């Protein structure tokens, strides 16, 4: 049987059953820095034979069919970038499987903070699954090509703490003793790298009927002031790109150890506390993460080779939002800063020009190592060139059509180009799109 692996960073075989929906039931063990519990995977179509899942540093305790019958499995030796392949043998007509497992204290998706590292002197846990770290959180098909819904997620945590998930909250149950269970579901299909949660001593402030900010008590009021215009930003984006598809837009201000400016987890953007400067001057961080609700989360790159489809589109969308809210001059200032960042990156990658193309070949390369401003800023330059070539009214109509056509799908650069040629014949050639996409530098 031939192997059809379409993502260079996943063991997922497109000829095998594909996951449609998952359940999670996990307990956070702060003492041992691990999650223990169970994941249930349900397939799009019944299938049998082998299914290959991604895993990293997981201890597999048992694998069973949905009816409870134990299944044979093999956990291969770990590969440095991909982790370990978990191959399960399914009976004919299997509709899913269930895996009991434990994470490692060094799981790449999880960061455990000591009480001394938080303002409230309580422990804190958060996940960061992008680009290929969801496999250290749970065994699954860890590729953006496989979009999944979450039928039910259960997190058992100390009752004095609260779990937040990038999903719809469905209440809390008393688990007895000093623990409680927080419940969630995610009806919109997402790539696995958008699975996200945090556990801590967290408070909430409402910003609008569909937006709120969460953080530790010490900074929640400052956060509410800083992000008071979140609803206005979402409305500006809706005028440009169409309806907001994720129901709520909540923001979680992370502890200082959070390694990014922001992370676009659907329904629950994670942001660094460094944006709390008191004058709302760093609102562009939120504009970028909010824009991802359309570009990246709604329409997603099929794998890391096409990362520019996420980030180039999002930088473009971010600057259109800023232009709508603050004027053209503000957007142009951000574009000038982005151009400078791109020049620095091009110098850094002078010996690796292949990493300065928009469409990359990252076989054998960790996507974290290839991370740079190229997909962001060079991608923005291409989209702006396309806009200038065809004119803004026609380009805006194309964007809305593009987002509608590929809504809740994961696509490649070729799919984008084919759709562009169908909707705006000849524009890609006139703009020199392939030079941006496959040519190094700018």
Image: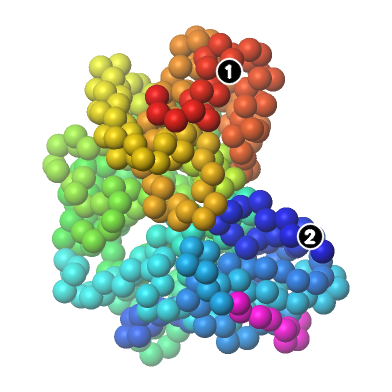
Task: Indicate whether residue 367 is drawn in magenta.
Answer: no
Quadrant in the picture for the C terminus: top left
Q: Residue at x 58, y 18 (%)?
A: 428
Is 68 within the magenta?
A: yes
Vertical comparison of 18 with 176: above or below: above
Q: Distance between the residues labelled 1 and 2?
A: 36 Å
Q: Give the range drawn in magenta.
A: 66-76
Tell me residue 309's x, y (percent): 51, 36
User: Looking at this rendering, what residue extends furthest in the right direction?
Assistant: 92
Which of these two is toward me, 255 or 238? 255
- Please, what secondary structure does the residue beneath circle 1 have? helix
- Residue beneath the point at 44% across and 30% down: 440
In this orientation, does residue 333 appear? yes
Q: Which residue is drawn at 35% across and 85% down?
A: 32
- Expressed as whole percent of the image width and height from the top left, the position of residue 389 reads 50, 10
Task: Say which of 99 and 244 sits in front.
Answer: 99
User: Against 200, is 315 above or below?
Assistant: above
Q: Which colour scheme is used?
A: rainbow
Can you give x and y, in whole percent of width and height, for residue 377 in the image? 37, 31
Which residue appears farthest toward the left when viewing the image? 278
In the depicted structure, whether residue 75 falls above or below residue 435: below
214 or 308: which is nearer to us?
A: 308
| Quadrant housing residue 327 | top left
Image quarter hosting the N terminus:
bottom right
> Label 1 crowding class (10 Å Cα cut-off): few <14, some 14-19, many 20+?
some
In the drawing, what numbered circle is on residue 428?
A: 1
Tell me the residue at 57%/83% (across/down). Answer: 60
Q: In this view, does 317 lie to the left or right of 272?
A: right
Disc sitting over residue 2 in the figure: 2
């Amino acid at each position: 049987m031939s192997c059809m692996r379409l993502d260079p960073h996943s063991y997922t075989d497109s000829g095998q059953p594909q996951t449609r929906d998952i359940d999670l039931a996990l307990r956070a063990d702060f003492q041992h820095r691990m999650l223990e519990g169970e994941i249930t995977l349900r397939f799009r179509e019944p299938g049998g034979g082998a299914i290959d899942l991604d895993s990293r540093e997981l201890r597999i305790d048992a694998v069973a069919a949905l009816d409870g019958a134990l299944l044979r499995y093999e956990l291969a030796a770990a590969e440095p970038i991909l982790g370990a392949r978990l191959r399960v043998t399914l009976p004919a007509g299997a509709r899913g499987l269930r895996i009991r497992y434990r994470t490692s204290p060094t799981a790449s998706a999880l960061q455990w903070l000591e009480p001394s590292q938080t303002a409230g002197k309580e422990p804190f846990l958060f996940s960061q699954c992008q680009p290929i770290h969801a496999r250290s959180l749970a065994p699954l098909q860890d590729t953006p090509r496989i979009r999944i819904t979450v039928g039910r997620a259960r997190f058992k945590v100390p009752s004095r703490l609260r779990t937040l998930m990038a999903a719809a909250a469905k209440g809390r149950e008393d688990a007895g003793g000093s623990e409680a269970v927080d419940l969630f579901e995610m009806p919109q299909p997402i790539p696995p790298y958008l699975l996200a949660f945090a556990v801590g001593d967290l408070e909430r402030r409402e910003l609008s009927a569909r937006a709120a900010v969460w953080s530790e008590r010490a900074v929640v009021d400052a956060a509410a002031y800083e992000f008071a215009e979140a609803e206005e930003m979402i409305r500006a984006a809706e005028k440009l790109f169409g309806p907001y598809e994720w129901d709520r837009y909540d923001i979680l201000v992370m502890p200082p150890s959070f390694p990014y400016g922001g992370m676009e987890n659907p329904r629950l953007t994670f942001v660094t506390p460094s944006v709390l400067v008191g004058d709302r001057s760093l609102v562009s961080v939120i504009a970028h993460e909010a824009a991802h609700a359309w570009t990246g989360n709604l329409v997603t790159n099929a794998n890391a080779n096409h990362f520019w489809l996420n980030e180039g589109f999002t930088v473009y969308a971010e600057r259109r939002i800023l232009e709508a809210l603050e004027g053209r001059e503000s957007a142009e200032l951000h574009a000038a800063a982005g151009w400078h960042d791109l020049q620095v990156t091009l110098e850094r990658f002078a010996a690796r020009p292949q990493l300065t193309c928009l469409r990359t070949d990252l076989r054998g390369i960790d996507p974290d190592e290839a991370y740079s401003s190229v997909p962001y800023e060079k991608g923005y330059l291409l989209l702006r060139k396309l806009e200038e070539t065809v004119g803004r009214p026609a380009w805006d109509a194309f964007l809305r059509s593009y987002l509608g056509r590929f809504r809740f799908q994961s696509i490649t650069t070729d799919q984008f180009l084919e759709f562009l040629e169908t909707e705006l014949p000849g524009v890609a050639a006139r703009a020199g799109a392939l030079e941006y996409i496959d040519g190094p530098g700018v």
